[in-house]
Image (spheres, helix red, strand yellow):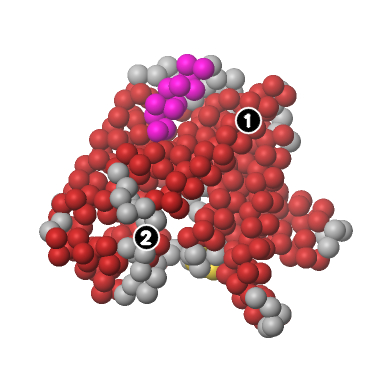
Amino acid sequence: MNQLQVKDTINAHQKLIEHRLTLFFDEKLNKCSNISPLAKELVDSLKEFSLRGGKRIRPILAIFGYKAIKEQNEAVLQAALAVELMESFLLIHDDILDQDDFRRGYYSMHKVYELKAKKLYPDSDAAHFGRSMAIMAGDLLASFGSECITRSDFPAELKIKAIDKFNRVIINTAFGEVMDIVSELKPEVSELDIIRVNELKTAIYTIEGPLHIGAILAGASRQQLDILTKYAIPLGQAYQIHDDILGMFGNEKKLGKPVGSDLREGKKTILILKALQLAKQPQVKSIMAALGNKSITREQIDEIRNIVLESGALDYCQNLVRQLSEQAKTHIRHSGFRPEGKSFLLAIADYMTQRDK
């Protein structure tokens, strides 16, 4: 499968998933309208947030995790919504933790409710209200996600295994988030520390979890799940490093949020860590002054970009992305997966590590 074919496949599945998401939220809106207008308003906000954009890579991976083992049936489309709703839940909470006010080209959930509070309740602590509502919104989505698996048309024993995986992905992501938060405060962080965070926060949540959920529902063996893990972990690492590069050098309109967010938040990515190791001492001081600076200017961001380029940190990370992606694909090439699943997993590895948004 070439890159044009993989894009066509992704586009076709995006439409299917968005149609299913729309039906799912419309059903929820009908049910919660009897509870309270506030409940209906919250679910309506969740619908808007979940449908406003996104690549739908995680549910697509769940579908092809299934297809790698067994020919697709319609039930897997319903179950695949679980990982899309999980993503929305984690993104809403992540935006609170990172104090990001924008997501997918519009306001983050906590900012949406903060602005509502300023308009409707001018004497309130609007920022606190926004965070509180966003936390509850994320919690609802987590529950909705597991519900998509329980309501899918698969044998009970497979659904139990899939829900167990769903829950373990959330647990690992939470541990990774805790490590990431603490790393922003620690004076020194090693590359191994960052790799571990990337594994927990990105590789398991973005690649392995969705693939495993789909494959489990197809009745995958332990050996088949192990192959998917050997593919998912290096690919997830590559995906995150590439994402860090885009966060520094990408296009703001395509990203849907300002470039330099990682610097503003004080995140120690492999890209930044390598620049600190390779840069000259005055440049190191510039990077340290920029890390965690909430008032960082565009000129400072441009200065750090130049340091990352001149130091060789960008080249190092781009090479690492290629090496990890190739490592991931090797395990799929030598697998006994169905051709439809195998060809897509090989092609999407390139798509995920060469994208521009």
Q: Which residues are magenta?
A: 222-233
Instruction: Count residues near mark 1 (Cα–Cα under 10 Å), then give few for <14, some for 14-19, many for 20+.
Output: few
Residue in front for this viewpoint, 282 or 156: 282
- Residue 33, by quadrant, is bottom right
Q: In the rendered structure, are the residues bearing label 1 and label 2 in contact, judged by CB atoms less than 8 Å apart?
A: no
Labelled disc at residue 84: none
Q: Which percent across, then down, holds residue 306?
A: 18, 63
Q: Amino acid at mark 2?
A: Gly
Instruction: Say above or below: 179 vs 112.
Output: above
Residue 232 highlighted magenta (yes or no): yes
Q: Residue at x 65, y 43 (%)?
A: 145
Q: Quadrant of the C terminus?
A: bottom left
What residue would you read off at disc 1? 164
Instruction: Say above or below: 130 vs 348.
Output: below
Q: Is residue 34 left or right of residue 219?
A: right
Instruction: Say above or below: 278 vs 295.
Output: above
Can I make out residue 61 in this image? no
Q: Is residue 9 left or right of residue 235?
A: right
What residue would you read off at disc 2? 266
Q: Which percent across, then down, holds residue 150?
A: 72, 34
Q: Secondary structure at mark 1?
A: helix
Spatial separation of the CA atoms under disc 1 and disc 2: 34 Å
Instruction: Count residues near mark 2 (Cα–Cα under 10 Å), then give few for <14, some for 14-19, many for 20+.
Output: many
Instruction: Say above or below: 159 vs 295.
Output: above
Q: Is residue 241 left or right of residue 78?
A: left
Residue in front for this viewpoint, 229 or 22: 229
Mark 1, mark 2: which one is toward the viewer? 2
Q: Residue furthest front?
A: 187
Q: Residue at x 31, y 25 (%)?
A: 330
